[in-house]
Amino acid sequence: MEELVDAVWANPKLHIAAGELEKAWLSKEIGAEPIPIDIAILARCMKAAAILSASADPEQRQAAFRIATQAFDLAADDTSRFAAALRVVLGRLGNFPSFVTKDAVDRALPGLPWTMAAEEIGSSVAQTVHANGENIVLSKFQHSLWSTLASGARAAVSAPTSAGKSFVLLNYLASLCAESGPIQIVYIVPTRALITQVSVDLEEKLLGSASQPVEIISVPLDSATPLPDRCIYVLTPERLQVLLHAHPNLSLRLAVIDEAHLIADGSRGILLQWVVEDLLERNEKTQLLFASPIIRNLSVFGDALGLGDIVERVSREPSVAQNIILVEVDSAPKGKVSLLSASADSEEVLLKATLNQTLASKYDKLVHIPAHFGAGAQNIVYANGSADAEKIAMQLSDRFSAREATPAQQQLSALAKEIVHGSYVLSKTVLKGIGFHYSNIPAVLRKAVEDAFGRGELDYIVCTSTLLQGVNTPAKNIFMCLPEKGYLKPIESTDFWNLAGRAGRLRKEFHGNIFLIDYSKWKTQPLSGPKDNVVVPAIQQVMQNQRAELMHVIRDDQDGPIGSKDLSTQTAFTRLFVGLKTGTLGNSLEHVGLEPTSAGAREIVAALNEASGTITLPNIILRQSPNISAHRQEELFLTLRQRMTSAEAAKRLIPLHPREASAFRNYADILELCHSVVLGIDTTKNLHRFHALLAQRWMTGWPLPRIIDEQIKRKPPIADRRKIIRDTLDIVESQIRFSVVRLFTCYNAVLVQALIESDLSSLMDEVSDLPVFLEVGASDKTMISLIALGLSRPTALRLNDIASDKNLDPAKARAWLAEQDLVALGLSPVLEAEVRRVLVGSGAARASDLTTQS
């Protein structure tokens, strides 16, 4: 067979025919003039694909997939025969999940010759696993990953977006939960946005399959709350660190690190590596799974952690093929375009079209080209930021102004008004089938948009680079023009290929299309760049590329370069300093390639030892604020100690409950101190007062529409309302729920230590847990309990308003909720569905309390 494969592949006629086949298929795909192709040529191509599909070479296997699926699509007059042949090719590729993409292929087994049917059955049996009461046929890659996980081995997996990693993982987690007895698992996600997605996916998979109830917890439980025996924690690295601090005896059976390549992402990457190291210190047998898009050096995870037993599982075969289509604007005033295939050897034009729309600006191109070539399909339009996303969505909805809104679209529109604001532009665009997606949109609304797109209720979704952070939103087509990731930063090739992997939906189509508009004018040419990424852990990057800045932070040089004040160098310093105090510094240096006896290592150790002479705070305090320099934490601590001249003076330093009369003044004073000492910023501009006011309103349960209304009132009448709404969403997410949480976390930690060392421990219980209040946007115990059960803030807020008792714990809150008439509550369908999910039992088995920071 290998000789036959080599002979077929070496035949130039195959490649000529494959090129003609692709040209004909793409012409049909984009609506160009049909290119006739003889049925005999299609048959010979399909035979060649059947042979190539037996190859072990990834390039030949991908060619087999493309040739066979394109031949099938073009053989419309001979569907049954070509469906059977395509089934053979897919079976030999081990891509059994794709059978269901076309009914004719799914039904073709009885028509196969018995030898080929036996071949398929034998292969499918070999790739079948029994999980959760059913037999599941996996692809070759999926089965390899399943076998590795089922053996208990640690694994690092790299595969395209459409390879089916999540499907295997969810089923594996469900199989573990089907066992009886205690089980502790953590699923680490990079962002809060993914917590909701993963939690809901787990709830749906576990419902009815677990032998005993399994709680899904997405918030860290405080030290006074017993941990459930059977639990899956879905947490960001920050939340996991809080949980580990509160429960020093927690030991986990499995840790899933999703989007593990973000170990290279600055301060958060350092923290991610740190918490995984903590898990291994607690239980050296913890099974680990590092899951990422395509990266080149999977060994990085073992090297970073000093582990030699991580099994690498790599797939370069997407379950869906992607086609790169270049769109060149020939005449901007008349809207004339040419479409070419990026994979073709020549620059032969597949299609020339006149859109009768001006295509002068980037916005023109990202509106009219997707509207024309994406009609009747699911489409993603890539935008460079939230403002761009809204503008493109508005113009797209104007293109489709004649559309009548469906009931589902009307419900989504009402939800956008209820969750964000009556003037929020999303409430208008979804009525025309157009959605948008960026990081600061509240999680419940963002998830509703994703779900509506997945169900086909929206056919266009305009996305920013948040799409790169594991959001599961595939589409038939992706449109890009001059793409950037971050302000004026052209997209890199690895990010481009990650995005391209979203084109094509497994089980729905064999191919996805990426339309690159005016590619010749892009600032970079990602098609010629690598598809895989070399991951360098963030702490290693700091120590190799920011050594001078790091040394300035360690030595606390106040006149150091700007880079010495960023979060990466501060987190690296705190990590290394704690390593010095715990005796693990040598291992940390070795893991980043520094021999302990090298000059660089000696310089760092000497500076850390010098710093230890002035830093008195215990490690347990420093670790609660890993992204704040240990020097700044010490300075804040000494300032508080100095001000604790008496018990009365100490009481004035304690954060008040948000509903207390003097809370705003109290918060303003605390933030002024933190801005001055921790951040080193000018406090005369009164940013601390603005943050204090907004933080108090957020914690006391002000809904977003009310907060936004207040911001609108503060602006001139002619101000751009859309910008005010975007800016307010950004302030809440990036300032209140991150920066202010970060400062109050540090303040509370060092305040408690100052009280202890001032013999005022009796006052510790009066310290309000503001970090939690800020994270969830609530301070009533009942509302916090409702959020702990798995409800979103808007849902919990609506329910809290009608609850007379504001002091319900989670168990009592659930019992109260079960007594309510859901119809009478008047909740929107999405929010009502949240409540019903909790009451069914999957969501109700969440955190039993929420009294720690997030």
Image (spheres, grey):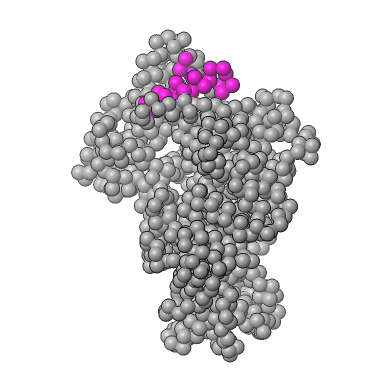
Q: Is residue 638 magenta?
A: no
Please provide percent x and percent y for residue 533. 39, 59
Please provide percent x and percent y for residue 701. 61, 30
Residue 155 seen anywhere in this rendered image of the structure = no
Residue drawn 46% across and 88% down?
13
Residue that protrudes farthest toward the left in the picture? 599
Q: Is residue 660 magenta?
A: yes
Q: Is residue 15 above or below residue 691?
A: below
Residue drawn 40% across and 27% down?
685
Classified by dominant secondary structure, the portion drawn in magenta counts as: helix
Task: Give the number of marks.
Answer: 0
Residue drawn 31% across and 45% down?
542
Residue 616 seen anywhere in this rendered image of the structure = yes
Say whether residue 327 is left or right of residue 533.
right
Q: Is residue 466 above or below residue 241?
A: below
**Residue range corresponding to the magenta coloring:** 652-676
Camera-side residue: 143 or 664? 664
Residue drawn 63% across and 26% down?
780
Q: Quadrant of residue 597?
A: top left
Q: Is residue 227 above or below residue 68?
A: above
Please provide percent x and percent y for residue 426. 61, 48
Camera-side residue: 837 or 416? 416
